[in-house]
Image (cartoon, rainbow, N blue to C red):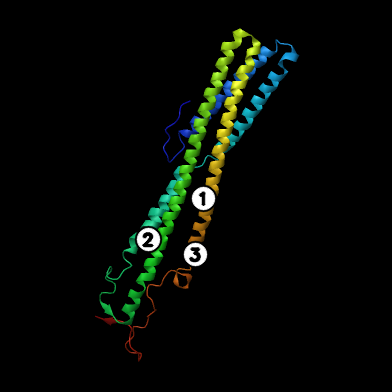
Amino acid sequence: MTASDAPENDLLTLVPAIHSGIEDAAELVHWLVRGVDTVLRELPPELVGGVRQGVADLQRQFDDMIGRLRHALEQAGDPAALRAAGTAWANTIGGTASNLVGLAIEGSTRADDSWKGLAADAYRGALWPQRLALTAVKTTGDAIDAALNELARAIVEFWRDVEIALILLVLGLASAVAAAVSTAAGGPLTFPIAVVAAAAALNAFGIALTNSMTMFSDLANENSVRTAELHRRLNDNSGFEGENWPNPTAERYSDGSLTDGDDTGWHLK
């Protein structure tokens, strides 16, 4: 097992490497437990009680930690999907709104070039509210993109931390197994040294795993607060006149008749 160089936007390399590390660690623990048990069978029960308990504790702690890790792997996350959603908000939605912002200023279009009077003034007066509305869409899209990308980065960093901790665990267990093999010639009572070394490696892994999960949980909770705020902004229409998208004209002028006794609001320049 070696540290992976997984792309930041997916877990296609990280997750298989972690699964491989779990299998390597499980094989080493199994070998150590089986080897110690074989040796202890040849000794009087009064001499091996503490060692047997230590081996049992080692197996139980390993099974518990790996069980937690396997459960987490079932919901490893999908950074690529998060980034794709963020890109859609920033580019497809926000980018489209941003392109339209430049049109929502006087002189940017020719729609009012051939008109003057109240209707033309009403059209020009509606440009600024529409510009503000389009800018709000762009700003919100960018904020959603940033939140989704931050969560994607956190997922990848979490699994990288887990992978590193797992590599250290495998190395520690391999060292314990090597110690058990090399000290066997010194007598069966030297096997507790290997059990203690393996337990130390497992404890270090447990601490690293707990710390990584706590940090990720804290960031996920923080991101949930940001998501709730973004959801509120998406549903907040208070910045729009009448809580709707701004009208295409500041006032409605639908009477273009010249024969109904009142003046039309539309005049050619």
Q: Nearer the viewer, mark 1 or mark 3?
A: 1
Left or right: 63 in relation to 259? right
Residue ranking furthest to the top: 185
- Label 1: which residue? 223
Q: How busy is the neighbourhood of tag 3: few (under 14 within 10 Å), some, or many (20 plus)?
A: few
- Cα gap from disc 1 to disc 3, whole angstroms: 20 Å
Q: Nearer the viewer, mark 1 or mark 2?
A: 1
Residue 55 coordinates in the image, percent (x, y): 66, 21
- Cα gap from disc 3 to disc 2, whole angstroms: 17 Å
Residue under the point 35% across and 60% down: 98
- Label 2: which residue? 97
Q: How busy is the neighbourhood of tag 1: few (under 14 within 10 Å), some, or many (20 plus)?
A: some
- Cα gap from disc 1 to disc 2, whole angstroms: 25 Å
Compare marks 1 and 3 and give the one earlier in the sequence: 1
Residue 31 coordinates in the image, percent (x, y): 60, 18
- Label 3: which residue? 236
**Along the viewing direction, whichever of 210 and 67 lies nearer the viewer:** 210
Q: Is residue 255 above or below residue 166?
A: below
Compare marks 3 and 2 and give the one earlier in the sequence: 2
Tell me the tag on residue 56: none
Residue 200 coordinates in the image, percent (x, y): 59, 25
Residue ranking furthest to the bottom: 261
Q: Quadrant of the C terminus?
A: bottom left
**Disc 3 secondary structure class:** loop
